[in-house]
Image (spheres, grey):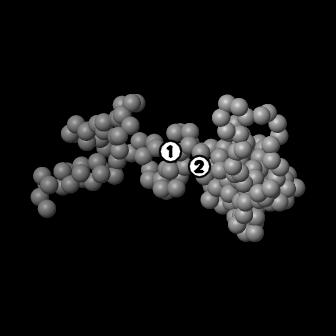
Amino acid sequence: MSDDELPETLATYLRLRGLEPTARGRRRRRRPAENDENAPFTPGRDPAAVGDVLASFTRQAGWDPDLAREDVVTMWAEVVGEANAARTRPTGFRDGVLQVSCDSTAWVSQLKLMRRHILTTIVQRFPEAGIDNITFQGPDVPSWKHGMRAVPGRGPRDTYG
């Protein structure tokens, strides 16, 4: 090596080791603006699991109670058991009350006895659903009151259950 190359090589070596500042101007790394959410290497840009993204999206959209109520309907057989689920079905939600339709009045009586257990299971498994009470309804029976001249009274008794 010639004498001219030695100092340049030494300067390069020292500059790379961080022992001597470079003679050239340093490039400054652009700092992202505070509102620049699409800038690379900023916090919050790491990849996330799809389940976590969907969970945060449904929470922000306010869908958690609706999705929890749908889970109650789809998992009704697990909540009340296969035999009870074969004869009953959830029909609606109103003001924290789950409405359940039954095939007969005997099943209404049976599920009224199990109400506390069913409600406890729902509250434990689906707390976001916001269900506070359950009502059970018997089968739909025809109405015997037609027209304006219907006589007030209790009408026919339980003849269809």
In the rendered image, the vertical position of residue 94 relative to residue 7, given as above or below: above
Q: Residue furthest front?
A: 149
User: In which quadrant will I find the C terminus?
Assistant: bottom right
Which amino acid is tagged 2?
Leu
Question: Which of the pair 100/57 is nearer the observer?
Answer: 100
Q: CA distance from mark 2 to mark 1?
A: 12 Å
Question: Which of the pair 156/128 is nearer the observer?
Answer: 156
Residue under the point 52% across and 39% down: 61
The reply to whether residue 128 is in sight is no
Q: Count of labels shown? A: 2
Residue under the point 77% across and 46% down: 135
Residue under the point 35% across and 40% down: 38
Q: Position of residue 155 (x, y in %)?
A: 80, 43
Mark 1 is surrounded, within 10 Å at the Cα level, by few (under 14), some (14 to 19) or many (20 or more) other residues, namely few
The reply to whether residue 10 is in sight is yes
- Assess whether mark 1 and mark 2 are in contact (beta carbons under 8 angstroms): no
117 sits to left or right of 41: right
Which amino acid is tagged 1?
Phe
Q: Position of residue 121 (x, y in %)?
A: 78, 56
Q: Secondary structure at mark 2?
A: helix
Question: Which of the pair 13/75 is nearer the observer?
Answer: 75
In the figure, residue 89 lies in which quadrant? bottom right
- Whichever of labels 2 and 1 marks the residue nearer the N terminus, that label is 1
In the rendered image, the vertical position of residue 1 relative to residue 26, given as above or below: below
Residue under the point 18% across and 51% down: 8
70 sits to left or right of 130: left
Find disc 1 in the rendering and name its residue: 57
In the figure, residue 97 lies in which quadrant? top right
User: In which quadrant will I find the N terminus?
Assistant: bottom left
Q: Position of residue 92 (x, y in %)?
A: 65, 46
Find disc 2 in the rendering and name its residue: 67
Q: Position of residue 52 (x, y in %)?
A: 53, 52
